[in-house]
Amino acid sequence: SAVISQKPSRDICQRGTSLTIQCQVDSQVTMMFWYRQQPGQSLTLIATANQGSEATYESGFVIDKFPISRPNLTFSTLTVSNMSPEDSSIYLCSVDEVRNEQFFGPGTRLTVL
Amino acid sequence: KQEVTQIPAALSVPEGENLVLNCSFTDSAIYNLQWFRQDPGKGLTSLLLIQSSQREQTSGRLNASLDKSSGRSTLYIAASQPGDSATYLCAANTGANSKLTFGKGITLSVRP
């Protein structure tokens, strides 16, 4: 399976600022996904990031708040913009491999004060 | 819209017990179903993937079954160990751009 890393692993940010999370995969993959896991909750898909096209956002998530880049087949970034305490969550990237099995990165734990 | 339910939310068992974790989904038109393990504050580890054409998958002490017609999947853990303590999540893949819909998870505690 693909090895996925995320940076930073955790961060504490001030309200109104932005944070960019990086996701690096050790092999080329077509589809990458960004999920959010709010405290005590399950995972919710934010968007699908495909190389060479605009990200596809799920209902309730917008590009201005969560801009995504996918410059190549091994890398993606998610920015959380104009943060508020409600954005405090674990953010995870995942990739879709053979047989449509998904593998996840270790996550980025974000706390907004 | 697919909805995935996992009940109960938490489970505590003594070491050595065999146990079954349940997962139900509303839309039987799934592409596959995946079980994950999540340790506190960590990412997800894929445990088992069952394709829609399969009935079950096994890996070590874990066995996952799938019954599409009834909208249910189970994860069987044999001879549970304290190291199995974690949250177990199931996720249904509807096939539409590989979108996963997750249940809320079952937090398992295995007492020594």
Image (cartoon, helix red, strand yellow):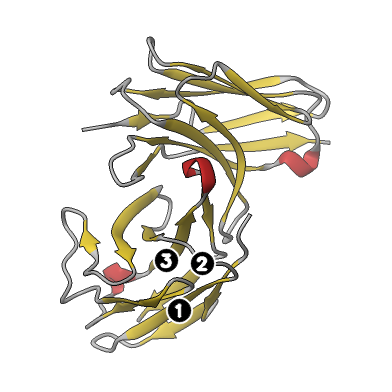
Which of the numbered marks, if any, corresponds to residue A77? none
Chain ID at mark 1 = A
Q: Residue at left 23%, top 87%?
A: A16
User: Which amino acid lies under the numbered mark 1 shown in the image of this protein?
Assistant: Gln
Q: Which mark is residue A28?
A: 2
Q: Where the C terminus of chain B falls, by quadrant? A: top right
Residue topped by disc 3: A91
> Compared with residue A52, is residue B47 higher up or lower down, i.e. above or below?
above
Q: Pointer 3 indicates a residue of which chain? A: A
Return the disc, 1 or 3, that comes first in the chain's sequence.
Answer: 1
Q: Which residue: 33% across, 37% down? A: B95
Q: Residue at x 21, y 60 (%)?
A: A57
Horizontal and vertical percent position of residue A21: 42, 79
Q: Residue placed farthest to the top in the image?
A: B69
Q: Quadrant of residue B13?
A: top right
Describe residue B110's horizontal placement relative to residue B101 as left or right.
right
Please identify the quadrant where the N terminus of chain B is shown: top left
The chain to which mark 2 is attached is A
In whole angstroms, how far apart are the C-alphas of marks 1 and 2? 16 Å
Of the two numbered discs 1 and 3 in the rendering, the one whose residue sits closer to the viewer: 1
Q: Nearer the viewer, residue A91 or B7?
A: A91
Q: Secondary structure at mark 3?
A: strand
* Mark 1 surroundings within 10 Å by alpha-carbon count, few (fewer than 14), some (14 through 19), many (20 or more): many
Secondary structure at numbered mark 1: strand
In this rendering, the label closer to the viewer, 1 or 2: 2
Say whether residue B32 is left or right of residue B35: left
Q: Quadrant of residue B11?
A: top right
Q: CA distance from mark 1 to mark 3?
A: 10 Å
